Image: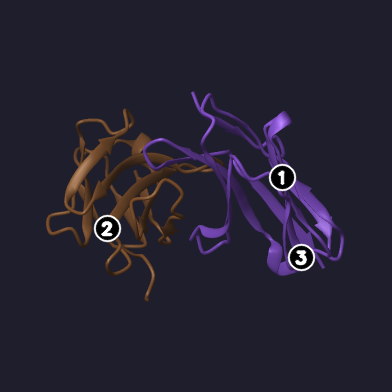
Chain colours: A purple, B brown
């Protein structure tokens, strides 16, 4: 069975600090895709990144970076120099087979000014 | 591209009543999904359509739930004889193609409260 675990329920940091959100997944398939979504207070899930299981290159997009390690089944997300606008709930998700996203429980990130 | 639209944004109903939600996907997206999200949890898959065909339903979708997408455009999700446990955010998403790795575009959801 597929499962995504985000062990950090809530994180609170001061603006400009770096913060890492952890994600660990379980799947028996060799072909799968991993995603991160952001859910601001408005409720709409906003796509951040998609990675396939064959591409373990880390990715950087502005202040955001992702570390995919197949050996530990982890797909962690780091925000550098956090800003108040980064405050949201962040979800890690896994897709495999029929296109059903399996989400983790989410991490509520609060950036304090 | 106006995004995925859901109506209503909020619905309060009494236990035992029927409710219906509507989702308008992004134009020409042929896949449409329904998810349910309870407080403090990630969204859970309910069902999805490819065009007008409902291809998969989760075991979470009891026989009180029915979803339709009659012309392959908008979709409705109906809950009959609502129960307090149905209180949740109901999210709709669409994707443009059939590929395994296509990202989903989500609406802002319908928040259902059953009293």
Q: Point out the image quarter for the N terminus of chain B.
A: bottom left
Q: Position of residue A107 (x, y in %)?
A: 66, 46
Badge 3: few (under 14), some or many (20 or more) residues near its Cα, within 10 Å?
few
Q: Please report whichever mark, 3 or 1, sits nearer to the chain's N-terminal start.
A: 1
What residue is shown at x 84% (from left), y 65% (from top)? A81
The answer to whether dots 3 and 2 both sit on one chain is no
Asked whether the beta carbons under mark 3 and mark 1 sit within 8 Å of each other, the answer is: no
**Camera-side residue: A39 or A70?**
A70
Q: Is residue B88 visible?
A: no
Residue A50 drawn at (x, y percent): 57, 52
Identify the residue at image location x=74%, y=56%. Answer: A65
Residue beneath disc 3? A63
Question: Which is nearer the eye, B84 or A28?
Answer: A28
Q: How many other residues sit within 10 Å of disc 2, few (<14), some (14-19) or many (≥20)?
A: some
Image quarter of residue B82: top left
Which residue is tagged 2? B30
The CA distance from mark 2 to mark 1 is: 36 Å
C-alpha distance separating marks 3 and 2: 33 Å
Q: Is residue A50 visible?
A: yes
């Amino acid at each position: 069975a597929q499962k995504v675990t985000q062990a950090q329920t809530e994180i609170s940091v001061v603006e400009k600090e770096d913060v890492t959100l952890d994600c660990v997944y379980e799947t028996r398939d060799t072909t799968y895709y991993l995603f991160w979504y952001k859910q601001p207070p408005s409720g709409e899930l906003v796509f951040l990144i998609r990675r396939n299981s064959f591409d373990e290159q880390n990715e950087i997009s502005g202040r955001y970076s992702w570390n995919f390690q197949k050996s530990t089944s982890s797909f962690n997300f780091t925000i550098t120099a956090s800003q108040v606008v980064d405050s949201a709930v962040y979800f890690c998700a896994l897709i495999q087979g029929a296109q059903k996203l399996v989400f983790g429980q989410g991490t509520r990130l609060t950036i304090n000014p | 591209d106006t995004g995925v639209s859901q109506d209503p944004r909020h619905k309060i109903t009494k236990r035992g009543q029927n409710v219906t939600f509507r989702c308008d996907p992004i134009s020409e997206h042929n896949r449409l999904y329904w998810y349910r999200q309870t407080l403090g949890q990630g969204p859970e898959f309910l069902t999805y359509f490819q065009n007008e065909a409902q291809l998969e339903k989760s075991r979470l979708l009891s026989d009180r739930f029915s979803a339709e997408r009659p012309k392959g455009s908008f979709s409705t999700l109906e809950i009959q004889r609502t129960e307090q446990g149905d209180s949740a955010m109901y999210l709709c998403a669409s994707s443009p193609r059939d590929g395994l790795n296509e990202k989903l575009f989500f609406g802002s959801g319908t928040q259902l409260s059953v009293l």
